[in-house]
Image (spheres, rainbow, N blue to C red):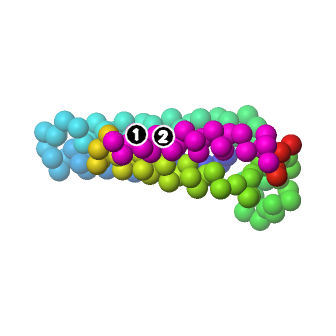
Amino acid sequence: MKVEAIVFLVVGIFATVMGLIYGIVTDWQELVGAPALFLSGGLGFMVAFYFWLTGKRIGYRPDDNPEGEIREFEGEYGSFSPYSWWPLWLGLTASLMFMGLAVGWWMFAIGAFFGLFALVGWTFEYFKGAHAN
């Protein structure tokens, strides 16, 4: 997890430096920008510390090797559904719901209605039909 820790360390350093620059440019009169950037930097440092600590506990991983191959990583990657159309409908209904937040609650309600059917279909797609287990 060395790479992940470095990425979030860079995020923390960047947000902290930008918070200092923002505070100096605004003469510390703006009450939201600099504290928000400092808090974002603190969040980056916390996540980097967590990844560093976890990486120290679990040791070297094949992911940390730049010359590593996919076959070196053992274990199950997860369960993927290559022929499922339900994530498409879930994405469309989520976009309809988010658009409803901007346009009107009536559109949000329509998206939630169709989203309920898409969520139930996605949840139970392996219980019935051609891909049933």
Q: Residues within 10 Å of mark 2 (few under 14, many from 20)?
A: few
* Vertical order, 58 against 22 (above or below): above
Amino acid bearing label 1: Ala
Work out whether residue 15 can be spotted: no
Residue at the disc numbered 2: 113
- Residue sitting nearer the eye, 82 or 41: 82
Amino acid bearing label 2: Phe
Q: Position of residue 39 (x, y in %)?
A: 37, 36
Our reading of the magenta stretch's main secondary structure is helix
Residue at the disc numbered 1: 109
Quick one: quadrant of the C terminus? top right
- Residue sitting nearer the eye, 47 or 119: 119
Residue drawn at x 77%, y 65% is: 67
Q: Magenta stretch? A: 106-129
Q: Position of residue 68 (x, y in %)?
A: 79, 61
Q: Position of residue 41 (x, y in %)?
A: 40, 41
Locate residue 132: give its quadrant: top right
123 left or right of 95?
right
- Report helix, strand or loop for mark 1: helix
Marks 1 and 2 sit apart, C-alpha to C-alpha, by 6 Å
